[in-house]
Amino acid sequence: MKKILFSLLLVVSVMYAKNGYPDQPMIEEYIEEPKQAKRADNNDILMKNSSMLISVVGQGVAPGFASSPAQAFALAKRAAMSDAYRLIAEKIKGVRVEGKDTIKNMAIKSSVVNTKVAAMVKNASVVETTYKEGLCEVEMEIELEYNNF
């Protein structure tokens, strides 16, 4: 009798593992493989014989270890310029976003989101730089032309 019950239990558990529990969709239905990123060509961003002006404002903060106000300004400006270059690259090439959630006992244990952008930015120019109370803002712009892209 025990062997029959054990066999029946084994068959039922294999059936549920294969087909999912009644009235519940299988988890695999919701999992999609990531699609390969399509490399953008000129037509995706600009039309023929057209141009586009991209303007961004990067922000940088003076570090606390700066030994002088001049050093604080220089470091904050450099950080703001790096931020502005990143913003330009994000607008031109887009951002790759990867996320991971860990769930334990039906509650979120940790959540991590990573972003990545990779691009070559040339001929961007600084339009305006402002520095106030340790915050530096750099406005940069770049003009994209179809022939130069």
Image (cartoon, rainbow, N blue to C red):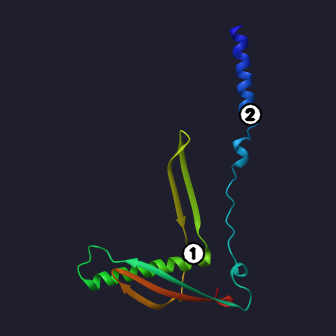
Q: x, y percentage for residue 124?
A: 52, 88
Residue drawn at point x = 43 percent, y = 83 percent:
137
In the rendered structure, the answer to whether residue 114 lies left or right of residue 33 reads left
Report which quarter residue 115 is drawn in. Answer: bottom right
Relative vertical location of residue 21 with respect to residue 73 in this rendering, above or below: above
The residue type indicated by label 1 comes to Glu
In the rendered structure, the answer to whether residue 81 lies left or right of residue 50 reads left
Which residue was labeled with disc 2? 18
Helix, strand or loop at mark 1: helix
Name, please, the residue furthest toward the left.
67
Residue drawn at point x = 30 percent, y = 81 percent:
72
Give the mark nearer the N terminus: 1 vs 2.
2
The residue type indicated by label 2 comes to Lys
* Circle 2 crowding by C-alpha within 10 Å: few under 14, some 14–19, many from 20: few
Q: Are marks 1 and 2 in contact (CB under 8 Å)?
A: no
Q: x, y percentage for residue 58?
A: 47, 80
Q: x, y percentage for residue 136?
A: 39, 82
Residue drawn at point x = 69 percent, y = 68 percent:
38
* Circle 1 crowding by C-alpha within 10 Å: few under 14, some 14–19, many from 20: some
Helix, strand or loop at mark 2: helix
User: Where does the C terminus fall, quadrant-wise?
Assistant: bottom right
Report which quarter residue 19 is drawn in. Answer: top right
Relative vertical location of residue 110 with respect to residue 60 in this rendering, above or below: above
Which residue was labeled with disc 1? 90
Cα–Cα gap, marks 1 and 2: 43 Å
Report which quarter residue 49 is drawn in. Answer: bottom right
